[in-house]
Image: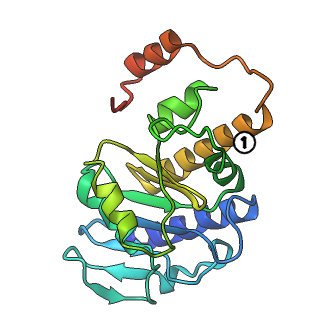
Amino acid sequence: MSEEARLREQICLLAKSMFDRGLTGGSTGNISARTEDGGLLVSPTGTSFGRLDPGRLSRFDSRGRQVDGDKPTKEMPLHTAFYDTRSSAAAVVHLHSCHAVALSLMPDADEDNFLPPLTPYGIMKLGRVKLLPFFLPGDPAMGAAVRGLAGKRTAVMLANHGPVVAGKDIEAACNAIEELEDTARLAMLTRGLNPRALTDAQVQALITKFDVEWDV
């Protein structure tokens, strides 16, 4: 099996796993990954994470031209914005995960540091998450907003919509976005209960020890 064939299978396997566990439903969410030749494999528009076909993924060459597969997700500007501004990005995942969306609806949601510091792994895998305003689905302005961050964030939260995470490979991106949803779930479960979050000193120790990107 070729490297690209393995990547196609991996994209579909990880997407189905997230769908089966309720991290995104129906035909929501989209996923993409870099190929060895600098191109992209992207989930097609209107498809379900639970039923992606490896042979029908949208295929782009290194110059951004579609060369094979079905029509890509309408959120392509969002994906390309991460690839163009973060040289380390080799995969991008966008979900409509419920707890992350719920947290984005809260009137006191922190725009510059969306996730509260409840566990070490939310910090280690995601760094500081930027909460972006609401955009209509498919609006190229979402991509422009990501570009405006100049590659300083590995993850953003689209208000009333869902999280988007870039990673060094497809598995890392999926693991990180699951950590984002888990942290948001913890935040919603403990909301109003005055939970003991990590202290500033503990957060700084994590950033230092694990060399976390932490845009200030």
Q: Nearer the viewer, residue 175 or 104?
A: 104
The answer to whether residue 164 is seen in the rendering is yes
Residue 80: image location, x then y, percent: 32, 66
> SS class of the residue under badge 1?
helix
The answer to whether residue 3 is seen in the rendering is no
Q: Nearer the viewer, residue 26 or 63?
A: 26
Residue 29: image location, x then y, percent: 58, 68
> Residue at coordinates 44% horizontally, 73% vertically from top-left?
75
Residue 208: image location, x then y, percent: 38, 17
Q: Callout 1 environment at 10 Å: few (<14), some (14 to 19), or many (20+)? A: some
Residue 135: image location, x then y, percent: 48, 66
Q: Which residue is mark 1?
A: 185
> Residue at coordinates 59% horizontally, 78% vertically from top-left?
52
Q: Quadrant of the C terminus?
A: top left
Above or below: residue 4 compared with residue 182: below
Report the label total. 1
Residue 61, by quadrant, is: bottom left
Residue placed farthest to the left in the image?
Answer: 63
Q: Nearer the viewer, residue 200 or 7?
A: 200
Which amino acid type corresponds to the residue marked 1 in the rendered image? Arg
Above or below: residue 34 compared with residue 181: below
> Residue at coordinates 24% horizontally, 67% vertically from top-left?
38
Above or below: residue 49 compared with residue 129: below
Q: How is the image coloured?
A: rainbow
